[in-house]
Amino acid sequence: MSEDDAAQRVLDGRTWSDFCDALKRAGEVVLRPGSPLDPFDRAEGFRYLSRLTRVALESYVEFADPLFPVLRRPAHETVKIGADNPDNYYQSAAIDGAHEYRLSGTRGTVHYLGFGTYAGSYGSKARRGQTGYLDAREMKIEADGSFEAILSCREQPGKNWLRMEPDTSSLIVRQTFQDRAHESIADLHLERIVADGTAAHPAPLTPAFLDRGLQAAAAYVHGTATIFADWAEGFAKAKNQLPLFDPAVAAAAHGDPNIVYYHGYFELEPDEALVIDLVPPRCEYWNFQLNNHWMESLDYRWHTIALNHFGARAKPDGSVRLVVAHRDPGVPNWLDTAGHRRGTMCLRWVGAQERPDPVTRVVRIEDVQA
């Protein structure tokens, strides 16, 4: 679209009205036949759309300039997307494969640190997944914890290099705690590598930038809601099971290549519990978590809805039994449904060479101890 066309769309209000109309259409995802009819789940669905709208405006309007990238938090305590990990501190930035970037900072003590570059977004037809990945364990880090990495299409011999491709459009950082109370995140700074004389600050807003940004934001809301509603409805066909998730689908959804995912759907009556038996493989990290139907992690600020390899209590033989229930059954490793009768669930092995399948069964809560 030309600058003149964009200016006219802003002047006559079509930019804004089209954005509002697109958001209205996103509501159809919450209302579609496969979505729960319960008023509670539906209310969470519409709140989910409001949260997606908030982060979409940050992504595609406020912090969308790849010439001046800003590391922001795309998922956190009140923005939740696609079984977001409660142990993660997520960061993201808009970048462009036509440029090169410098990522610098200090490593911190967080258990796991990974950087990925990606092409497209959930609302984009051009979405094709990961274009490069760099694990902090592979990086050269100085004795004082400082490091520098270059993001570029050109290989950088002898340097920490994070690969980009011409259509790369975003950087995603995953910092994963095993013990949040005693670990510190990496302190990161991202900048475009420029020659002398380049503008020191972003240009003023243009009608074309706003028009593109609002269109992309609305597409992201609808696209994200649709993708994960499709997933949830698929998981619900085999309730209270936790099968291996297709790695290719996970990669296309901007998953971490070091992670093996298991996704499922729980649905429990008030007097029922879901018992999950695991034999964790040797791995860097694992966790299990509960989400609502919309694949938002349940509120981990107030409820124990997730456990990892550090916090879960194992048996003498190394196996772990998790128990999902609406109330405390009086056994270790209880996961609180936080008032949800149904929802999705996710198990992750990070850096595992083996893939032992979990075993699930539904029992009465009073029988759990037995």
Image (cartoon, grey):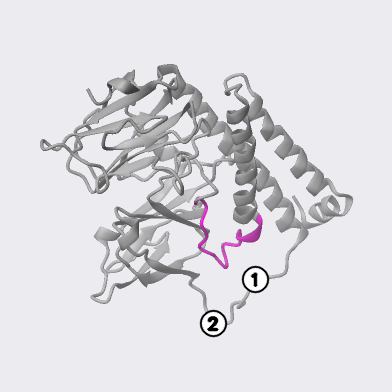
280 sits to left or right of 186:
left
Counting residues from the N terminus, which is met first, the one under dot 2 or under dot 1?
Answer: 2
Given residues 199 and 354, the one toward you in this image is 354
Circle 2 residue? 196
Residue 271: mark in rendering: none
Q: Amino acid at mark 2?
A: Asp
The location of residue 314, given as percent across then percent down, is 19, 39
How far apart marks 2 and 1 lie (CA) works out to 16 Å
Given residues 202 and 225, the one toward you in this image is 225
Tell me which residue sits at (51%, 42%) in the image.
81
Given residues 233 and 321, the one toward you in this image is 321
Q: For mark 1, give the secondary structure.
A: loop
The location of residue 276, given as percent across then percent down, is 28, 28
Given residues 202 and 172, the one toward you in this image is 172
**Going by the picture, which residue comes out furthest to the bottom?**
196
Mark 2 neighbour class, 10 Å CA radius: few under 14, some 14 to 19, many 20 or more: few
- The magenta span reads 61-76
Circle 1 residue? 202
Mark 1 neighbour class, 10 Å CA radius: few under 14, some 14 to 19, many 20 or more: few
Based on the picture, tell me whether residue 261 belongs to the magenta stretch: no
Residue 245 seen in the figure:
no
**Going by the picture, which residue comes out furthest to the left?**
317
Q: Would you identify the image quadrant in which residue 186 lies?
A: bottom left
Q: Amino acid at mark 1?
A: Pro
The location of residue 246, given as percent across then percent down, is 36, 30
From the image, state whether disc 2 or disc 1 is nearer to you: 1
